[in-house]
Image (tube, helix red, strand yellow):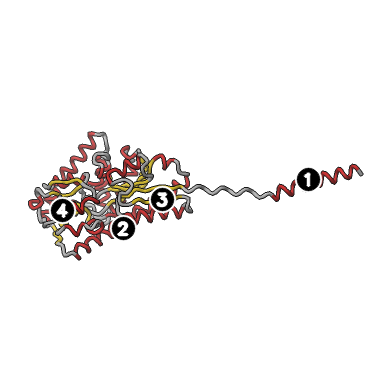
Amino acid sequence: MKKLAVVLLVSTFIFTGCAKKSDVPTPAKAPEKTIELNYSIFFPPTHVQCIEAQNWADEIAKRTNGRVKITIFPGGSLTQAPQCYEGVVNGISDLGMSCFAYTRGRFPLLEGLDLPLGYPNGLTASRIATELAMKYKPAEVNDVHLLYIHAHGPGILATKKPVNNLEELKGMKIRATGLSAKIVSSLGATPVAMSQPETYEALQKGVVEGTLCPIETLKGWKQGEVIESVTDSSVIGYTTAMFVAMNKQKWESLPADIKQIFTDVSKEWVDKHGNAWNQADEDGKKFVESLNHKTISLNEAEKQRWKQAVQPVIDEYVTAAKAKNLSGEKFLADIQKMLQQSPK
């Protein structure tokens, strides 16, 4: 009887212990902490490129199932356009979008993207800029993680009085940034450096007499309201390359799957920004027409004069890059080859 009692007691203990173990619920996995990032953009919130940036951020949130939340600070409210890149480097912002040209001399190889080479449209410019930056991986951007680049359509000349030829442009004060300032000088005008947010008031008050810009700017930044004439100088159409970059330490802290999502979405958004630039240029043309502003087309002889006038800018880039042991000549040749192969 004693043996039977012991067996029953042990069996009961084992059964009860097992039952208790199986009844204990598995602790719920702690939810992953949301990665919150801030994003500094110099475009105003209503500008199509700021809207595309918001769409990009929303897509990141969607594909990460809400694990990443990006808050955009538009209009230079976190860092002003010229300070945006350094703001990313120093961690003032986790992400930033601005123009390489706003910190002249800081990006000696990538300056080649902005040369007056006759870019046909923003989509082509955006594709070329991103592809070559990823191909060359210049040391000048090693202090950030470069996600992608987009770039506007061909720069044109918008002025407060008509400009039909180089003689009429001579001595005029023209707003320009970075490499485009050299373009203005080569055309015989006087460049005045300033970012887009400053330009409307400068034109309005006569601080400058014109601006070298993509035609979309005349609507996107409302500058069409304070100019009277547009000269189609797309034969020397330059672009302005705009980085989308992340603080390097922040990037390295991200999980591998999150990094891949950022990479994938960014690749897709090159064309989205490029197409947005194209559409914005069309809208800009219509806006100029609605204001009854004159659009001047250069004749063939004048086009050749403008091309010859800016050739020293292109040559100077190659020489300066070589002096710094950079592959400027090869970089330029790649751009020109891609432009020849691109649909017009």
Identified at 32% across, 55% down, the residue is 45
Question: Is the residue marked by circle 4 packed among few (<14), some (14-19), or many (20+) residues within 10 Å?
Answer: few
Question: Is the residue marked by circle 2 packed among few (<14), some (14-19), or many (20+) residues within 10 Å?
Answer: few
Spatial CA distance of label 1 from label 2 is: 70 Å
Q: Between disc 2 and disc 4, whose residue precedes? A: 2
* Label 3: which secondary element: strand
Spatial CA distance of label 2 from label 4 is: 24 Å
Look at mark 1 in the image and give the residue it sits on.
14
Question: Is the residue marked by circle 1 packed among few (<14), some (14-19), or many (20+) residues within 10 Å?
Answer: few
Spatial CA distance of label 3 from label 4 is: 38 Å
Identified at 22% across, 34% down, the residue is 323
Look at mark 3 in the image and give the residue it sits on.
70
Look at mark 2 in the image and give the residue it sits on.
46
Confirm whether residue 129 shows in the render: no
Disc assigned to residue 90: none
Answer whether labels 2 and 4 touch (C-beta < 8 Å): no
Look at mark 4 in the image and give the residue it sits on.
205
Q: Between disc 1 and disc 3, whose residue precedes? A: 1
Confirm whether residue 1 shows in the render: yes
Q: Between disc 1 and disc 2, whose residue precedes? A: 1
Q: Between disc 3 and disc 4, whose residue precedes? A: 3
